[in-house]
Amino acid sequence: MNVFLTIAFLLSVVFAAHLVWWRVAVPRRQRSALLLLFFTGSLTISPLAAFTLQKAGFAPLSWVQWLNVALGVLAFTLAYVVTYSALEADSPTLSLIRHVATAGSRGLTLEDLQAFMNERPFVTARLSALLEDGMLSERGGRYLLAEHPYTLFRLVLFHRHTVLGLVDDHGG
């Protein structure tokens, strides 16, 4: 229970800081800022969490429990950063569902849906976000996957292709 409460305390405080920061000024490299905020913020306020829980009558955490807290914070942070792109950008799926919902019981024709999709700047918006976050770079009119720190994405692409057998849009 102490581990859960510590994780909940840390993430609540850091998430509140995230909301305030984003209301004041959205950082240029949002994913990097989120990683920095969640990791350094959690590390910085860990002593406050320990003090608060001890004052509330809970026993101090052992080093193994602190390791579990660190793993919990790490897992939440990575999951949030991965899903953040769906929250921040104009997602084709969410926009399409929202558009169909606005039609109500009358529904939409396939032509209506195709027209809606043609009007949306999904690719342009996503490309701009990837460039701004440093995940892609543009050199001489060509877009390249950033070398560092996005080596993890290269591993994901490798896994998708070799392990899962998934083929991307251009056959690779």
Image (cartoon, rainbow, N blue to C red):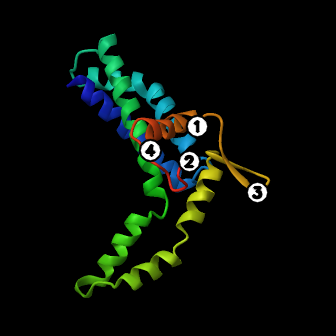
Out of 60 and 164, give the one closest to the viewer. 164
Pick whichever of labels 4 and 3 is earlier in the sequence.
Answer: 4
How many angstroms separate mark 2 from mark 3 (CA)?
25 Å
How many angstroms separate mark 1 from mark 2 (CA)?
15 Å
User: How many numbered marks have been drawn onto this rendered protein structure?
Assistant: 4
Q: Residue at x 35, y 18 (%)?
A: 67
Mark 4 in CB contact with mark 2 (< 8 angstroms) = no
Residue type highlighted by circle 3: Gly
Which x, y percent locates residue 15? 41, 43
Vertical relation: 121 (above or below) 109:
above
Q: Which residue is mark 4?
A: 82
The furthest residue to the right:
140
Mark 1 in CB contact with mark 2 (< 8 angstroms) = no
How many angstroms separate mark 1 from mark 4 (CA)?
13 Å
How many angstroms separate mark 4 from mark 3 (CA)?
28 Å
Pick whichever of labels 1 and 3 is earlier in the sequence.
Answer: 3
Q: Secondary structure at mark 1?
A: loop
Q: Which residue is mark 1?
A: 150
Q: Quadrant of the N terminus?
A: top left
Residue type highlighted by circle 4: Val
Which x, y percent locates residue 3? 26, 24
Rendered image: mark on residue 30? 2
Q: Which residue is mark 3?
A: 141
How many angstroms separate mark 1 from mark 3 (CA)?
21 Å
